[in-house]
Amino acid sequence: PIEQQAPDPSKKTLVVLGTGWGAVSLLKNLDTENYNVVVISPRNYFLFTPLLPSCTTGTIEHRSIMEPIRNFLRHKVAAVKYYEAEVTKIDHEKKVVYMSPDSDSAGQLGQQELAYDMLVVGVGAENATFGVKGVREHGCFLKEVGDAQKIRKRIMDCCETATLKDQSPEEVKRLLHMVVVGGGPTGVEFAGELQDFFENDLKKWIPEIADHFRVTLVEALPNVLPMFSKSLIEYTEQTFKEETIEIRNKTSVKNVTEKYIEAEYTDANGQKQVEKIPYGLLVWATGNAVRPVVKDLMSQIPAQKDSRRGLAVNEYLVVKGTDNIWAVGDCAVANYAPTAQVASQEGAFLARLFGQMARTEELESRLALLSEEQSRAAKKEDRDEILREIKELQRRFRRVKQMGPFEYSHQGSLAYIGSEKAVADISWLTGNLASGGQLTYLFWRSAYLSMCFSTRNRILVIMDWTKSYLFGRDVSRE
Ligand code: FAD
Ligand code: NAD
């Protein structure tokens, strides 16, 4: 085997699970010299999710919003170990994690075990299906790069198949009906991007589909974007109407088959009706569910028994019922929405907390040493000198110990709604500023550009935007 650098026995082993918003923000801000840091994640890159909907239509190429984890870990002062593997179990009692590499080349390596002193769980969430049958088999999710690629291929597949010789009119109609389930920001942004793709490119390249291409957004609640202010909800619904995206509010999808969905709604007489809606592409964006590895950990800890949506944490993000496990992001329940903004602030908070803990431990061991020296010192002046040092250390100790709990600072919510319009609820001094339109779209672009992980990402995204603007989006099916 490749010779591995042995961990420093004088330091604790800090294992971080995941390479998403929470984990990467922690790693970016962490002083890695204080711990033996090990990162485990099946994904060896960070993904800038806010621009993922743009990858489904090729406005942005997926590699432009990916940043290899190794690229930034190599700049850390102390080496960080990374394993590309999925953690399948966390044993809270034994303080070990079990991981399996997700690679055919791993051969007989199988499951491996790794002990930790401190563990940060930042594994995110999986897609919710609410037990609706057929979603996994026939629908596309929109969470990972692979999902965006699948959708991009599927859009082109539908368009090309619809224009085949002798295609029946019903099939043409079905194939060109793009259905999005879930009117949260993921569903809304995707629907907007898709309609743009049709208006700006598909219509020109494949004029035969112009009369049949339709986008429908299905939402169980009375309106889309429930987390936005009322005026922006209305603005979004009005904009969708103008863009000819049909919104089916108060409609809940109960079953999915290969060619149609079954949607339940209440008719004008108050009767429940089920409608079969044929589709060519189905994108399922109904939010988050707890990952099995997190569920399993919760089942080991009695204090987690009432938690449903993820690991309940205290105000220092410590998983309740443990003293050496922390959780960040979508897998943690801390009374905040599961967003990138929350996850990254939590990660940065933990980096500060761990820095403080390392300083506290160092001061504690120095204090213990000095007390010992003081009790052994024979001369009074030596004892006094040591006492002075102890007092100084105690003063520093008190300062270090004063770190407050995690407090989330909400910067606002932003979403793209198509035809170069965006909506934004921005926290502004003491109030809230709600705005929608093309200026907001420019703000949306500049905000996301500035938030990109690296300068490399930023340049690639600008190049992609320019390319799409000048030459249109690429409609070739890979
Ligand atoms: P993630 O970023 O999902 O990362 C989880 C990590 O854990 C990944 O690296 C994954 O590979 C790894 N992992 C998974 N299972 C295991 C395992 N068993 N063992 C080890 N590692 C594992 N939020 C906003 O605030 N603004 C936005 O504009 C926005 N846009 C979004 C657009 C889309 C399309 C989506 C899907 C989400 C968007 N979000 C946005 C939400 C945001 O992406 C999430 O809240 C955020 O990613 C949560 O961060 P996280 O670190 O908890 O999880
Ligand atoms: P979400 O949970 O915000 O919305 C899912 C929607 O699906 C809900 O409105 C729900 O009523 C609906 N739904 C559930 N089951 C349904 C069914 N059977 N039929 C019809 N509708 C159904 O999910 P999301 O949009 O994926 O967002 C997940 C998280 O990521 C949220 O916290 C969100 O704020 C965040 N996010 C933010 C942005 C942004 O800020 N631009 C973008 C994407 C995601």
Image (cartoon, helix red, strand yellow):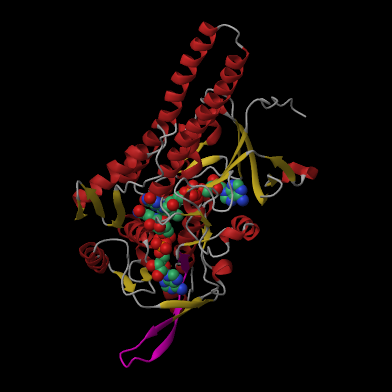
* 268 drawn magenta: yes
Taken as a whole, is the magenta stretch helix, strand or loop? Answer: strand
Can residue 266 be seen in this snapshot?
Answer: yes
Region of the chain picked out in magenta, as a range: 264-284
Q: Position of residue 444 (x, y in %)?
A: 28, 47
Name the residue: 53% across, 42% down: 19
Q: Is residue 209 magenta?
A: no
In the orientation shown, which residue stands out farthest toward the right?
108
Using the image, determine if residue 293 lies above or below residue 454.
below
Q: Quadrant of the N terminus?
A: top right
Whether residue 10 sits left or right of residue 219 in the image: it is: right
Q: Is residue 249 above or below residue 465?
A: below
For residue 251, which quarter of the picture?
A: bottom left
Q: Which of the two residues, 398 or 467, is positioned nearer the viewer here?
A: 398
- Front one among 189 and 61: 189
Q: How far from the left and from the top, in percent, is residue 6?
A: 70, 25
